[in-house]
Image (spheres, rainbow, N blue to C red):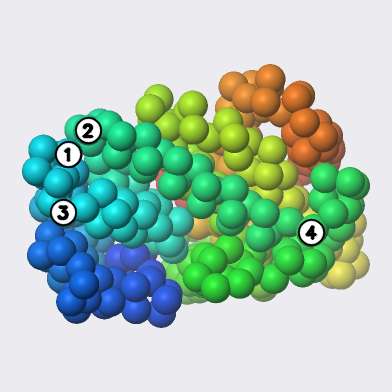
C-alpha cells in the first residue's frame, strides 16, 4: 500500500474513489433487488452496491478482494452444478468490466484484471471478449462517423460531435474530464512549485476545458496483462484512432491557447511561458496513451494493415506523433510533470 499512498498523496488518484455515473449505480441496484436473479447474483449486486458507497480508493480495493473471488466461485459452481446460470455469471463479469472505464478507477485495474487468471473457461474468454467489445464501443463513440474515410481531420471541437455517446457510454466516453478540472485546481492552489520563478510551469494557469484521454489509462492496464492482448487486436483500429484524436485534442488545446495569448511559441511578452498548460493528471493520461499507442502500433501491425480502418488509424497516429515531435508542448509538459514529482 505504500506505493499507492505516495501516488495518492501526489494527487495522482482521486481521494474519493471511483466516480460512478447514475446509469451504473442503477444497474447495480437492479442486480441487488432482482427477484428473477439467482441468490449469487443478488449477493454480488448487494456487495457491489456497498462498494459504490465507500468512496475511498483504499476501501474499494479491500472490497474488490472479496467480490472478485465470489465471482470466480460462482463461475465454478455454474460449470459444476448449473447454478447460478451462465447468464448470471456473464452479468457479474460485464458489470465488473465496466469499472475499468470509469473515472478514477485506475487504482482498481490491477485487482480487476487479476480476475482473468483464476476464471474457468469459457468465462475467462467471455470476460476478455466483453472488455474488447467495450473498448471498441467507447472508441467508436469518440470518433466521427466517417473517420475511416478521412473524416478525422478535425480540431478538438469536432471530436465526438458526429457520434454523440448514447446510453450508458455517454457518461464515460466524453472528452471532458472532471478529474482534469480538479487536477488543475489542485495544481494552481498548491504552492508545490507550480508558480515558483524559474520552474518550467512558472506563471502558468490551468488550461480550461482540457480534453481527457478516455481510453488511455484503461488500455495501458489492459495491454499490461498478457491474457488480454489477444482480445484487443479486434478493436485495435478504432482504439488507436480514438487515442490519437484525444492526444491531439490535448496538445492542440494548449497550442490554441498560446496562440490566443498572442504567442505561437508559447511565450508571453516579458519572457515568461504562455498562460496555459496541461494539468498534471491529464498529462499523466497523455503519457499512458502514448505508451499504449506505441504498443498497439507494433503488436497489432498485421490487424491494422489488414483493413481500411486500420490503415487510416496508422496514418492518423503518424500525423499526431509528427505534430507532437515538431512542437515543444509534449516535452515541456513532461518536464514540468517530472519536476513536480521530484
Front position among marks 2 and 4: 2
Front position among marks 3 and 2: 3
Cα distance between the residues tagged 2 and 4: 38 Å
Cα distance between the residues tagged 4 and 1: 42 Å
Front position among marks 4 and 1: 1
The reply to whether the C-beta atoms of the residues labelled 3 and 2 are less than 8 Å apart is no
Residue located beneath label 4 in the image: 144
Badge number at residue 79: 1
Please state if 189 lies on the left or on the right of 62 as rendered: right
Cα distance between the residues tagged 3 and 4: 41 Å
Q: Which of 18 and 310 is in front in this view?
A: 310
Cα distance between the residues tagged 3 and 2: 14 Å
Q: Nearer the viewer, residue 52 or 123?
A: 123
Residue located beneath label 2 in the image: 120
Q: Which of 143 and 31 is in front in this view?
A: 31
The reply to whether the C-beta atoms of the residues labelled 1 and 2 are less than 8 Å apart is yes
Please state if 86 lies on the left or on the right of 334 as rendered: left
Residue count near mark 2 (Cα–Cα under 10 Å), binned few <14, some 14–19, many ≥20:
some
The reply to whether the C-beta atoms of the residues labelled 2 and 4 are less than 8 Å apart is no
Q: Which residue is drawn at 34% across and 73% down?
A: 27
Q: Which residue is drawn at 45% across and 46% down?
A: 131
User: Residue 239, percent across and down?
Assistant: 63, 43
Residue located beneath label 3 in the image: 84
Cα distance between the residues tagged 3 and 1: 9 Å
Residue count near mark 3 (Cα–Cα under 10 Å), binned few <14, some 14–19, many ≥20:
many
Quick one: label 2 or label 4, which is nearer the N terminus?
Answer: 2
User: Residue 146, percent across and down?
Assistant: 85, 54
Report which quarter residue 160 is drawn in. bottom right
Quick one: label 3 or label 1, which is nearer the N terminus?
Answer: 1
Cα distance between the residues tagged 1 and 2: 9 Å
Q: Is mark 4 on a helix, strand or loop?
A: loop
Quick one: label 4 or label 1, which is nearer the N terminus?
Answer: 1
Amino acid at each position: 500500500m505504500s506505493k499507492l499512498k505516495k501516488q495518492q498523496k501526489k494527487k495522482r488518484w482521486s481521494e474519493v474513489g471511483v466516480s460512478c455515473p447514475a446509469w451504473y449505480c442503477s444497474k447495480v441496484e437492479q442486480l441487488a433487488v432482482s427477484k428473477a436473479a439467482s441468490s449469487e447474483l443478488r449477493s454480488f449486486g448487494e456487495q457491489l452496491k456497498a462498494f459504490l458507497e465507500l468512496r475511498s480508493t483504499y476501501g474499494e480495493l479491500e472490497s474488490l478482494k472479496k467480490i472478485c473471488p465470489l465471482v470466480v466461485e460462482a463461475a465454478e459452481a455454474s460449470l459444476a452444478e448449473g447454478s447460478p446460470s451462465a447468464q448470471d455469471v456473464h452479468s457479474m463479469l460485464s458489470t465488473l468490466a465496466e469499472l475499468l472505464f470509469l473515472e478514477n478507477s485506475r487504482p482498481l485495474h490491477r485487482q480487476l484484471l487479476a480476475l482473468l487468471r483464476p476464471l474457468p473457461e469459457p468465462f475467462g474468454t467471455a470476460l476478455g471478449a466483453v472488455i474488447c467489445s467495450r473498448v471498441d464501443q467507447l472508441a467508436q463513440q469518440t470518433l466521427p462517423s466517417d473517420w475511416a474515410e478521412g473524416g478525422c481531420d478535425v480540431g478538438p471541437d469536432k471530436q465526438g460531435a458526429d457520434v454523440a455517446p448514447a446510453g450508458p457510454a455517454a457518461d464515460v466516453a466524453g472528452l471532458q474530464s472532471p478529474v482534469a478540472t480538479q487536477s488543475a485546481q489542485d495544481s494552481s492552489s498548491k504552492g508545490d512549485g507550480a508558480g515558483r520563478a524559474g520552474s518550467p510551469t512558472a506563471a502558468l494557469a490551468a488550461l480550461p476545458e482540457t480534453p481527457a484521454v478516455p481510453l488511455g489509462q484503461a488500455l495501458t492496464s489492459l495491454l499490461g496483462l498478457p491474457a488480454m492482448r489477444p482480445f484487443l487486436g479486434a478493436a485495435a483500429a478504432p482504439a488507436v484512432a480514438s487515442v490519437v484524436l484525444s492526444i491531439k485534442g490535448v496538445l492542440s488545446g494548449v497550442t490554441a491557447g498560446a496562440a490566443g495569448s498572442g504567442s505561437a511559441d508559447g511565450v508571453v511578452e516579458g519572457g515568461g511561458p504562455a498562460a496555459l498548460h496541461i494539468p498534471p493528471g491529464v498529462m499523466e493520461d497523455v503519457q499512458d496513451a502514448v505508451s499504449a499507442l506505441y504498443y498497439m502500433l507494433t503488436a497489432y501491425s498485421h490487424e491494422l494493415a489488414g483493413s481500411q480502418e486500420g490503415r487510416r488509424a496508422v496514418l492518423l497516429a503518424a500525423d499526431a506523433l509528427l505534430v507532437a515531435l515538431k512542437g515543444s508542448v509534449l516535452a515541456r509538459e513532461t518536464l514540468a510533470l517530472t519536476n513536480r514529482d521530484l
